[in-house]
Amino acid sequence: MSELQEKILAVLNDGGFHSGEALGSALGVSRTAVWKQLQKLATMGLPLESIKGTGYRLAQGFELLAAVDIRAHLSAASPRHIDVFHSLESTNTFAREQAAKRDYAGSVVFAERQTAGRGRRGKEWLSPFGASIYMSVLWDFEQGVQALQGLSLGVGVAVRRALLELGLADVSLKWPNDIYVKGKKLGGILLEMVGDPEGHCSVVIGIGINVSMPIAIGQNIDQPWTDLDSELLSAVSRNKLAARLIDEIFTLLADFETVGFSAYRDEWESADAFSGLQCAIITPRETVSGVLSGVDNNGAVRLRLADGSIQRFIGGELSLRQV
Ligand code: ATP
C-alpha cells in the first residue's frame, strides 16, 4: 500500500466526510491524485461512500483495526505484541519471519488485506481490504509435534466459542479446519510449524473470518461462503471480534500441551458439520467413502465404511467432501 494511500486512510478514519480538494490540500497532492488513490482503495475492498459536492467517507460503522482498540476489548489474554498492518503478503508469512528474527512468541499480527492469503496446499484465501479478520498467532511449544496433535481442531473450537459469544447462533466445524454457518464457509484456519518437530518448536496459527465480504469479490470464491454481516442481526465491531478471538485462542494455547485435544473433543464433535453424513475422504492416492463418525483424541477423522469397520485419517494432504 502506497504512502499516499496510508495517509488518505488515516484522514478518513475519523468517519467524517472529506472533499477531494480538502484531502488533496491536506496531503499536498492534486484532487485527481486523491481520486485515483480512492478508486484503487475501493477496488481493494475499502468500503467508501461518496456524495457529490460533499466528499468521501468510510461506510458507516466501518472501523479500521487498531492495536489499542483490540487491547481495550481483551479480557483474558495479554499478547506480547499486537501488530496491525494495512497490507501484508500473508499474516502467517509475517509471523514465520518474526519467529526467525526475534522473540515473537505469544504475539499476534493482523492485516487489513493480504496480497497472497493462503489456504491449505497452496490454495488462495481471498483477502480484500477491511472485509474480514486475517490474523496469525505465534506460539512456542516444548514437547514437539507429538503433543500438538489435534491442535488445529482445538483452534476451531476456540474460534467457534468466540463467534458464539458475539451472538452467532449456529457455528459448525468441518474437519480439519473450516468454520461453517448453515453449510457455508465463514472462515478457515491454517497451522504451520516452525522449528524442531522433536523438541522446541513454534506454531503459526492463521485465521481468516469473513465479516463484510463485498459480493463482487466474493463471487470469485468457488464454494458456498458467507460473512458475519449476513449472519448476524447487528454489525459486529472487528476490533471486538479480534479481541474475542485472541482471548479464546490464548486460553486454548495456554494449556493445550498439558490437556491435549481430548479436552476439546466432545465440543468439537457436537459442532461437527458433517457428522453422520455420507462423505468421502480424498487422498492423493485414493477416495474412500463412508459415514462420518466423529474424531479421535489425536484429531483424526473417523469414517465408518460399508463393512462396518472404522477407518481413521490424519494429515495435511486430505480433503473431506460430502457426497
Ligand atoms: P480442504 O482443504 O478440506 O479441501 P478447502 O477446499 O475449503 O478444503 P482450504 O484450504 O480450507 O480448502 O480453503 C481454501 C478454499 O476456500 C479456496 O480454494 C476457496 O474455495 C475458499 N475460499 C477462499 N477465500 C475464501 C474466503 N474469504 N471465504 C470463504 N472461502 C474462501
Image (tube, rainbow, N blue to C red):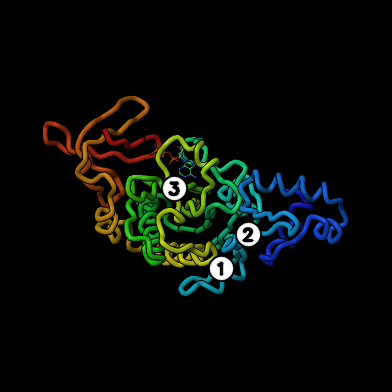
Depth check, front residue: 44 or 253: 44
Ligand 1 quadrant assignment: top left
Which tag, 1 or 3, sits closer to the chain's start? 1
Q: Residue furthest front?
A: 53
Task: List the residue tagged with mark 3.
Answer: 188
> Which residue corresponds to the image point at 31% horizontal and 25% vertical from the top-left?
286
Q: Callout 1, which amino acid?
A: Ile
Q: Nearer the viewer, residue 235 or 241?
A: 235
Identify the image quadrant of residue 251: bottom left
Q: Which picture quadrant has residue 15?
A: bottom right
Q: Which residue is mark 2?
A: 84
Q: Residues within 10 Å of mark 1 (few under 14, many from 20)?
A: some
Q: Quick one: quadrant of the C terminus?
A: top left
From the Cβ of disc 3, is ligand 1 less than 8 Å away?
Answer: yes
Confirm or deny contact between disc 1 and disc 3 (CB under 8 A): no
Q: Earlier in the sequence, mark 2 or mark 1?
A: 1
Asked if residue 202 shows in the view, the reply is no
Instruction: Name the residue that disc number 1 marks.
Output: 70
Q: Disc 2 to disc 1, how far (Cα)?
A: 10 Å
Q: Is disc 3 surrounded by few (<14), some (14 to 19) or many (20+) residues within 10 Å?
A: many
The alpha-carbon separation of the residues under discs 2 and 3 comes to: 20 Å
Q: Amino acid at mark 2?
A: Val
Disc 1, SS:
helix
Mark closer to the chain start, 2 or 3: 2
- Measure the alpha-carbon separation of dots 1 and 3: 21 Å
The residue at 23%/47% (across/down) is: 294
Decide if residue 267 is on the left or right side of residue 304: right
Contact check, label 2 and label 1, Cβ < 8 Å: yes
